[in-house]
Amino acid sequence: MSLGEFAHFIEIAPRSQNPKVISRILREKGAPETRYCISASSKLDAKRLPLPQALDEIVERAMGTFLSRLPDILGYLEDQDQRCLLERKQIR
């Protein structure tokens, strides 16, 4: 089962799995410049980084990392197998 099968996870198409496109997607959804990192990498873990820098460090590096800035609304998750947006949509 992939994360894209869970509610609120949106798998990123393979052709869009690069830092510039992911940054654009997140910005279109309201992501601010700085992101908080939770990562398997001690270099990134528990740090606030500019979005482009954070994505340059994690995309295609096969380490588990979660970027968050809009609590309960928008995040980005990458692990060794996939890249996903976490977007909570209002339920009516």
Image: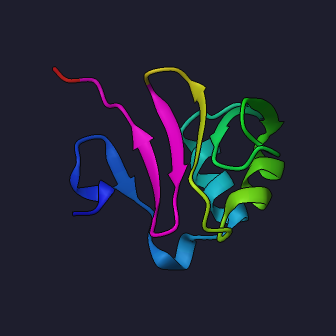
Q: Nearer the viewer, residue 76 or 13?
A: 76
Please state the total of marks drawn on the protein image. 0
Q: Is residue 29 left or right of residue 89?
A: right
| Left or right of 78, for residue 6 | left
Is 64 magenta? The answer is no
Q: Position of residue 71 (x, y in %)?
A: 51, 20
Residue found at x 35% / y 31%: 88
Q: Which residues are magenta?
A: 73-90
State the residue at coordinates (31%, 55%): 3
In the picture, residue 28 is in which quadrant? Answer: top right
Q: Quadrant of the image for the C terminus?
A: top left
Q: Quadrant of residue 20?
A: bottom right
- Where, quadrant-wise, is the N terminus in this rendering? bottom left
The residue lying toward the viewer, choosing from 40 and 21, is 40
- Counting from the top left corner in percent of width and height, residue 90 is at 28, 24
Q: How is the image coloured?
A: rainbow
Q: Residue furthest left?
A: 92
Query: Is 85 part of what is drawn in magenta?
Result: yes
- Residue 90, compared with residue 81, is above or below; it is above
Residue drawn at x 48%, y 77% as measured from the top left: 14
| In the image, residue 49 above or below residue 41 | above
**Residue depicted at 22% across the width and 56% down the height:** 5
Left or right of 54? Residue 14 is: left
Q: Position of residue 27 (x, y in %)?
A: 64, 43
Q: Is residue 23 above or below residue 71?
A: below
